[in-house]
Image (cartoon, rainbow, N blue to C red):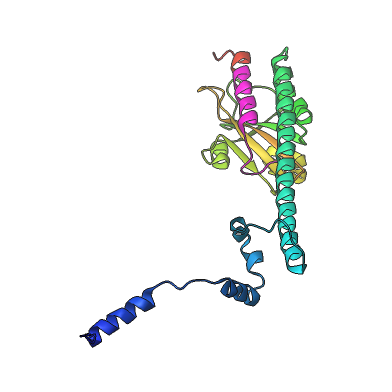
C-alpha cells in the first residue's frame, strides 16, 4: 500500500529541488550576450576561457575572430611600448653613468685645491648637462673652517639641515630656484638635485646643488645611486686636499 507523504516531507523535497543548481544553456548565454553587447569589451579576460572556431564562415564568426585579432594587436602595441620605454631608460642610464664617470675622472685630475673647486662649481655643470652647479657650505658668520676660497656659497648655520630634512639627497621638480644657492641664476632653475657632502667632523655641513631650467630633469623618485657616488668621491677629495685624514 502506498503511503501518502506528509506535508513536512513534501515541503522538504520542494526545498531540495529549489536548491539544485540550474543548468546554464547555450541559448541562455546567447540571450545574455544579446542584452549585454559590450560584455566582452568590459570583461576581456573572458576571452581566455573561450576556444574560437578553427574554420567557419558567416558574419558572426568573422566578427568573433576580428575581436581576437584586435586584442592581439593591442597586446602587441602594449609590449612594444613597454620595451621601447625600457630601452630608452637603459640608454639614458648609460649616458648618465658615462657623464658621472667622466666627472669623477676630472675631479681626480685636479692639481690644486683651487682647480678642484673650479671643477665643482664650473666644469661639473657642463659635463653633467645641467645649467648650474654650486657648492653650499654653512658658516658661523665669521669664517668657514678649513675652506677659504672663492666659488663657494655660504648660508647660515642650520640652513642645510632645514633644506634636506634629514635626507642625504633631495630631488625636486617644478620649483622656483633659491637665490641664496644659485645667485643671479636662480630665476632659471626649475628643478634641482641637492646632495649632502659630509667632509669631516671639523667642517660644517655642505651640499652640492645642481640646478636645471628643465622642470623635469630632476624629480622625486629618480634613482640617486650615481650622483650619490659622485658626492662620496667629492667628500674624499676634500679630505685629501684639506689634509683631514
Above or below, 4 against 37 in this view is below
Q: Which residues are magenta?
A: 217-238
Judge left or right: residue 9 versus residue 35. Answer: left
Front residue of this view, candidates 141 and 205: 205
Which residue does the image show at 62% across and 44% down from the upper left? 220
Q: In this orientation, does residue 190 appear?
A: no
Percent across and percent down for residue 219 are 66, 44
Residue at the far front in the pictured view: 1
Above or below, 202 against 245 in this view is below
Percent across and percent down for residue 159 are 57, 39
Q: Quadrant of residue 56?
A: bottom right
Above or below, 130 against 189 in this view is above
Characterize the magenta stretch by its predominant secondary structure. Answer: helix
Above or below, 143 against 209 in this view is above
Q: Quadrant of residue 10?
A: bottom left
Quadrant showing the N terminus: bottom left
Front residue of this view, candidates 203 and 239: 239
Q: Quadrant of residue 102?
A: top right
Which residue does the image show at 63% across and 17% down from the upper left? 237
Which residue does the image show at 56% across and 26% down from the upper left? 198
Residue 236 is a magenta residue: yes
Front residue of this view, candidates 34 and 241: 34
Percent across and percent down for residue 233 are 62, 21
Amino acid at each position: 500500500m502506498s503511503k501518502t507523504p506528509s506535508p513536512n516531507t513534501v515541503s522538504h523535497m520542494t526545498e531540495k529541488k529549489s536548491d539544485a543548481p540550474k543548468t546554464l544553456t547555450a541559448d541562455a548565454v546567447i540571450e545574455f550576450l544579446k542584452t549585454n553587447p559590450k560584455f566582452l569589451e568590459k570583461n576581456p579576460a573572458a576571452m581566455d576561457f573561450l576556444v574560437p572556431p578553427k574554420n567557419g564562415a558567416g558574419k558572426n564568426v568573422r566578427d568573433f575572430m576580428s575581436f581576437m585579432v584586435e586584442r592581439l594587436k593591442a597586446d602587441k602595441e602594449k609590449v612594444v611600448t613597454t620595451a621601447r620605454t625600457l630601452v630608452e631608460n637603459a640608454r639614458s642610464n648609460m649616458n648618465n653613468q658615462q657623464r658621472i664617470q667622466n666627472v669623477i675622472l676630472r675631479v681626480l685630475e685636479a692639481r690644486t685645491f683651487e682647480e678642484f673647486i673650479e671643477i665643482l662649481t664650473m666644469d661639473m655643470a657642463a659635463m653633467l648637462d645641467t645649467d648650474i652647479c654650486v657648492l653650499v657650505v654653512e658658516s658661523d658668520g665669521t669664517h668657514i673652517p678649513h675652506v677659504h676660497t672663492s666659488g663657494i656659497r655660504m648660508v647660515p648655520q642650520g640652513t642645510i639641515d632645514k633644506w634636506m630634512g634629514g635626507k642625504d639627497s633631495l630631488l625636486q621638480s617644478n620649483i622656483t630656484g633659491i637665490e641664496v644657492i644659485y645667485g643671479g641664476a636662480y630665476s632659471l632653475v626649475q628643478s634641482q638635485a641637492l646632495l649632502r657632502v659630509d667632509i669631516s667632523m671639523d667642517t660644517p655641513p655642505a651640499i652640492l646643488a645642481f640646478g636645471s631650467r628643465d622642470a623635469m630633469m630632476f624629480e622625486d623618485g629618480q634613482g640617486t645611486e650615481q650622483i650619490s657616488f659622485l658626492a662620496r668621491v667629492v667628500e674624499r677629495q676634500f679630505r685629501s686636499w684639506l689634509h683631514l685624514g
